[in-house]
Amino acid sequence: MQNTLITTKASFQRINYRWRVVDIVVASVLGVAAALIFFGWNQLYAPVTAPFEALLPGSQALFYGVWLFAGVLGGLVIRKPGAALYTEVVAATVSALLGAKWGGFLTIEAGLVQGLGAELVFLIFLYSSWKLGVAILAGAGAGLAMAINDLVLWYPGADTAFQAIYTVSAIISGAVIAGLGSWLIVRALAKTGVLSRFASGRVQTARA
């Protein structure tokens, strides 16, 4: 056990925290691309989720993971401290500029909270593990952060049942759509060679 801890700490110390220009550029591009997906989803989510909300109030959050994937994807690709937070905030900021219906400040605030949810999971693993399980946990963390934020800002006074259903639904959605989904996207991108300048691309290519 002690040897494992020493190895983990050594790996953490070897991490290159310094962001390269290519890291900033690619994270920004991912954020902007995610914002365009957000924009499209903003137009579609209401009719898609309405039947679920009517059947079981709170379950509409099962689809909200679409708004969470930017942070997880950025973290998995860049593999640097702050990547998840940065990418999600860029996506939220561009989404706000495109005219998100929730207003500029609240959209960016939501991105900040959701990005932190994913970022904290990567931090817990000392930015040294990028396996599927970690990606799923990062998505779940973003989902939990979103649920807490939404319940405070948008559903104050909601009953316990709604809060529980909404929170569980958000976590599941984050884990599947943002976590698993982002992990699959990274694998697909790596196979094209576009991530060759990143450890995420080299590792996936080597395993193929």
Image: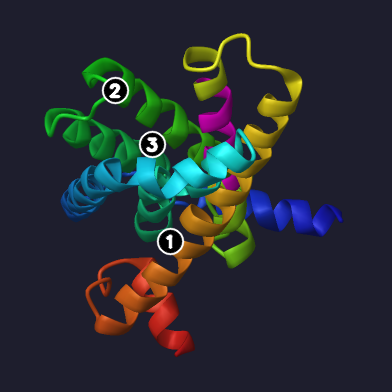
Is residue 173 visible to the viewer in this orientation of the structure? yes
> Where's the C terminus, which quadrant?
bottom left
The magenta stretch spans which residues? Answer: 140-149
**Where is mark 1, residue-wise?**
182
Q: Most prominent secondary structure in the magenta stretch?
A: helix
| First in residue order: circle 1 vs circle 3 | 3
What secondary structure is found at the residue carrying circle 1? helix
What secondary structure is found at the residue carrying circle 2? loop
**Where is mark 3, residue-wise?**
85
Q: Are marks 1 and 3 in contact (CB under 8 Å)?
A: no
Q: Quadrant of residue 135?
A: bottom right
| Identity of the residue furthest to the top in this view | 157
Q: Amino acid at mark 3?
A: Leu
Along the line of sight, which residue is nearer the eye, 204 or 156?
Answer: 156
Percent from the top left, x then y, of residue 8? 67, 54
Along the line of sight, which residue is nearer the eye, 75 or 180?
Answer: 180
